Image: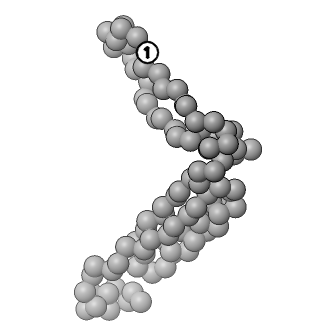
């Protein structure tokens, strides 16, 4: 199912008709790599999160589980360190 996805995804919002007429031609991208080279190259996903009480950490781990289930995907989870002082966290009753 996922093996047919391109090595990259280009997101470009649609151009209104009036503006499209100003451009001489449509820009296109072609993919030069073969299916064999695409399958050898892993897709890397980085999940970066901040979590005070652990709810977002649980969500990040569940997202990782889902992404890990896709062949050829490497997932890395990074937690942003706490920036609040211990005194503030204590007043918030945060762990």
Give the camera-side residue of 41 and 76.
41
Which residue is outermost to the right? 1
The answer to whether residue 91 is seen in the rendering is no
Residue 46 relative to residue 66: left or right: left
Tell me the residue at 52%/40% (across/down).
8
Q: Quadrant of residue 3?
A: top right
Tell me the residue at 62%/43% (across/down).
37
**Residue 59 place in picture, x, y as percent:** 55, 69
Give the camera-side residue of 56 and 29.
29
The quadrant of the picture occupied by the N terminus is top right
**Residue 2 place in picture, x, y as percent:** 69, 45
**Residue 80 place in picture, x, y as percent:** 37, 73
Label 1 belongs to which residue?
26
Tell me the residue at 55%/31% (across/down).
32
Tell me the residue at 51%/67% (across/down).
76
The quadrant of the picture occupied by the C terminus is bottom left
Give the camera-side residue of 81 and 41.
41
């Amino acid at each position: 199912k996922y093996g047919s996805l391109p090595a990259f995804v280009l997101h470009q919002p649609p151009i209104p008709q009036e503006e499209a007429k100003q451009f001489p031609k449509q820009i296109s991208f072609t993919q030069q790599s073969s299916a064999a080279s695409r399958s050898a190259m892993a897709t890397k996903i980085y999940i970066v999160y901040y979590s005070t009480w652990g709810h977002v950490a649980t969500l990040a781990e569940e997202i990782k589980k889902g992404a890990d289930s896709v062949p050829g995907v490497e997932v890395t989870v990074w937690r942003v360190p706490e920036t609040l002082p211990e005194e503030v966290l204590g007043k918030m009753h945060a762990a």
